[in-house]
């Protein structure tokens, strides 16, 4: 980054004296008395005024340039070196069939749980510029949707492509933790975390959730768990012989297991029942897992005073030459 600065900016206050000196000079000039006006009648008044003002303009322009030069203008170049200890984050997101429940509202319109989750997670990602973030999707199966990356645009594009049922309709929480832990286990970072979001209970996969959490604990990985959805029956839009209609079904979240997973890994469990609470949860996690960002500023300065001093000297010498030649004043 390039910028202009003055080493002694207080000297620029002297520029305020220039208008005062100009007014004083004009007052003195208007007070000059001539013994006879006969010699001036033959001189063009217009040309006389121009010739009379030229030395004054040259003198005070030179003074202004000298003042700027003495203030030592400098061109600065600033380089910032970022030294950060980021957090490696895996977003494990449930896309099972129950995520199509319409118990969340966005702009007063009922929307699916997954739709709200995508919006909130996108905001969370945008606030983590210094962190590597990846994404694991799970349903009946679990797979890596996006490997760990610093490129937010790539991650957000993968997030936008999430669809309900893309990994099956069941819920494999243990498999999701296992895949996420595998992505993080060999990385050297300040902190490694998994943010696992689900609206159900483990009913698929080959590894139990608590066993997977134990493995993550030995690898130094924290698992923040989020249960999403209102308590009780949730509305679902289904096809019937009469067209689309709403039905209500119970969707049970295994809060006990989710809470144990977080406790085992020194993290926290959260429950989101509406859009606001879901946003607050991701804000809390954002505060709990901050990246350490340090910056070193390197600045170099190039002196520019000669760009003002030399023109000032030229104007000053020009004024002396002109005043003692064809702009010479009458005694």
Image (tube, grey):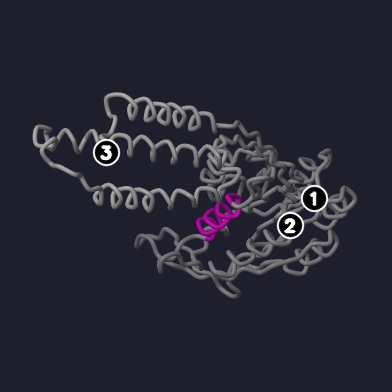
Say the numbered circle drawn on residue 53. Answer: 3
Quarter-of-image position of residue 57 = top left
Residue 250 in view here: no
At mark 2, the secondary structure is loop
Q: Nearer the viewer, residue 91 or 101?
A: 91
Say the numbered circle drawn on residue 191. Answer: 1
**Position of residue 246 in the picture relative to residue 81 (left or right):** left
In what quadrant of the picture does the C terminus appear?
top left
Mark 3 vs mark 1, foreground winner is 3
User: Which residue does the image show at 55% across and 44% down from the upper left?
Assistant: 156
Dominant SS of magenta comes to helix
Q: Please provide the residue range marked out in magenta.
A: 113-126
Q: Earlier in the sequence, mark 3 or mark 1?
A: 3
- The residue labelled by disc 2 is 289
At mark 3, the secondary structure is helix
Query: Where residue 103 appears, x then y in whole percent?
Result: 51, 68
């Amino acid at each position: 980054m390039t910028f202009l600065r003055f080493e002694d900016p207080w000297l620029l206050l002297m520029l305020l004296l220039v208008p005062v000196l100009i007014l004083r000079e004009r007052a003195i000039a208007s007070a000059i008395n001539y013994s006879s006006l006969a010699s001036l009648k033959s001189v063009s008044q217009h040309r006389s005024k121009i010739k009379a003002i030229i030395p004054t303009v040259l003198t005070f322009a030179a003074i202004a340039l000298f003042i700027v030069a003495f203030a030592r203008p400098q061109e600065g170049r600033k380089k910032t070196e970022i030294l950060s200890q980021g957090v490696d984050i895996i977003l494990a997101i449930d896309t099972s069939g129950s995520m199509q429940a319409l118990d969340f509202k966005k702009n007063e319109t009922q929307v699916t749980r997954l739709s709200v989750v995508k919006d909130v997670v996108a905001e969370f990602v945008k606030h983590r510029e210094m962190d590597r973030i990846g994404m694991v999707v799970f349903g009946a199966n679990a797979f890596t949707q996006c490997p760990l990356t610093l490129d937010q645009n790539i991650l957000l594009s993968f997030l936008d492509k999430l669809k309900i049922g893309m990994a099956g309709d069941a819920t494999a929480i243990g498999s999701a933790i296992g895949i996420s832990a595998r992505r993080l286990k060999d990385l050297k970072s300040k902190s490694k975390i998994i943010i696992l979001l689900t609206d159900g209970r483990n009913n698929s996969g080959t590894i139990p959730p608590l066993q997977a959490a134990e493995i993550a604990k030995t690898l130094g990985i924290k698992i923040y768990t989020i249960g999403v959805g209102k308590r009780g029956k949730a509305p679902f839009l289904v096809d019937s012989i009469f067209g689309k209609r709403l039905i209500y079904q119970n969707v049970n979240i295994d809060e006990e297991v989710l809470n144990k997973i977080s406790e085992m890994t020194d993290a926290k469990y959260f429950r989101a029942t509406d859009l606001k609470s879901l946003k607050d949860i991701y804000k809390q996690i954002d505060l709990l897992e901050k990246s350490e960002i340090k910056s070193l500023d390197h600045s170099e300065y190039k002196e520019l005073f000669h760009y003002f001093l030399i023109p000032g000297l030229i104007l000053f010498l020009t004024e002396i030459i002109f005043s003692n030649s064809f702009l010479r004043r009458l005694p």
